[in-house]
Image (tube, rainbow, N blue to C red):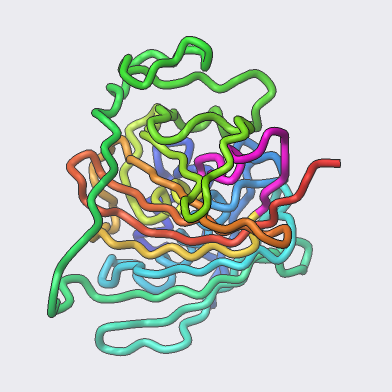
Amino acid sequence: MSAAADTARTGSTAFARATAVVPQGDGRYAAAVDAGWEAPTGPNGGYLAAILVRALEAEAAPGGERRLRSLTVHYLRTAQTGPLDLEVRTVRAGRRLASTTVTARQDGREVLLGLAAFAVPDLAAAGTWAPTAPDAGAPPAPDAAAVPVEAYRADAGAWVAPMPGMPAITNQLRLSPRIGGLPFAGRTPRPGQAAETGGWIGSPEDQPIDAAYVAQLTDFWWPPALGALDGPAAAPTIDLTIHFRADLPLGGLPAAPVLGHYASSAAQGGLVEEDGTLFLPDGTLLAQSRQLALLAPLS
C-alpha cells in the first residue's frame, strides 16, 4: 500500500476515514461514499472531489514527490451512498509536470470524471504575486462555542450551529460567516457586482490541511447565488476546477481555520458560476476554484 493511501485509510479524523481509498492494483482503488457528507441534492461535490484526490495522489505521487496543482471534475451522475470504484491513469509524466485522469464508477456506470495536473515542488518562478485575503477578522478559537444562527454575531468569536433540518454535511465542519449574509435573503446584486458569501471554516478535529481537505473546502460553503434568492433552489455542480496554490506536503499543513470567499457574477439560463478563494489565517493563498452549477427552482 502506498504512503498516501495508507495515511487516508488509517487517518484519525472523520474526514480522512470518509475519503479513504484502498488500492486494488493496476491503478484501481476502492472507496465508499459516506452518508454523513450528503448535501441537499446528493453527496457534496467537494467531498467527492476529495475522494478523487486521495486516489490521484496515491497513484501519481505516493511519496509526495509531486504536488497536485490542478483538478477538474465533471459530475456525470448523482453519486449514491455506498461503494465507489476508481481508476487512475497517467496520460503523460515529464520531468516537471504530469497529467493524470481518474474515473469513478458505481454499479459499472461513470459517476465522476477528473483530469489532474501534478508538478514537482519548488518550480523556478519568473515572478510572484497573490491576492489579498478579505478583511474577515480573526477566526474563532477551535474550541469556541457554536451558537444558534439567531444569536450569532460575527464579532463574538463563535461558530454558528447548524439549523435543524439542514443536510448531514453541515454537521461535519464549523462555519463562522463573515462575508455577505444567509441564504434566501433576496440580496440581488446590483449591476456589475457579484453575489458574495464566505467566512471561516474549521474542523472539530485536528484535521491537517492537505489537498483532499482543500478540495472539500472549495465546495463546502453554501453557494453565493442562494443569498440573491428569496426562496429555496437547487444548485448541483456540473463541473469544478481547483487550483492548489500553496505547497501542500503529503501529510498536509498543520490544522488551522481556513477563510473561504465565494462569489458569483452571472446567473443566466438556469446556470450559475462560482469563484472560490481559500486563505490560511496568515493570509497565505491556499487555493482558487471555479465551478458551474445548475440554478433551478424547487418544484
Decide if residue 263 is on the left or right side of residue 137. Answer: right
Q: Is residue 201 visible?
A: no
Q: Residue at x 47, y 48 (%)?
A: 216
Closest to the observer, 247 or 232 = 232
- Span of residues in magenta: 220-236
296 or 101, which lies in front?
296
Q: Is residue 278 above or below residue 139?
A: below
Q: Residue at x 67, y 49 (%)?
A: 235
Residue 296 visible to an observer of this rendering: yes
Instruction: Judge left or right: residue 223 versus residue 39.
Output: left
In the image, residue 259 sits, relative to residue 3, either above or below, namely: above
Q: Quadrant of residue 155?
A: top left
User: Does the magenta run of residues contain 231?
Assistant: yes
Quarter in which the C terminus is drawn: top right
Task: Point out residue 280 in the picture as x, y percentages from the top left corner.
Answer: 25, 44
- Residue at the extreme top: 151
Quarter of the image containing the N terminus? bottom left
Q: Position of residue 83 (x, y in %)?
A: 68, 53
Q: Nearer the viewer, residue 269 or 168?
A: 269
Up/down of 129 relative to 234, above or below: below
Name the residue furthest right: 299
Q: Give the residue at x 51% y 75%.
A: 115
Residue 87 in the image, given as x and y percentages of width and height: 58, 72
What is the quadrant of residue 134 in the picture? top left
Does 251 lie within the magenta span?
no
For residue 77, side relative to residue 117 (left or right)? right
Q: Position of residue 35 (x, y in %)?
A: 66, 39
At x 45%, y 44%, the residue is: 16
Q: How many marks?
A: 0
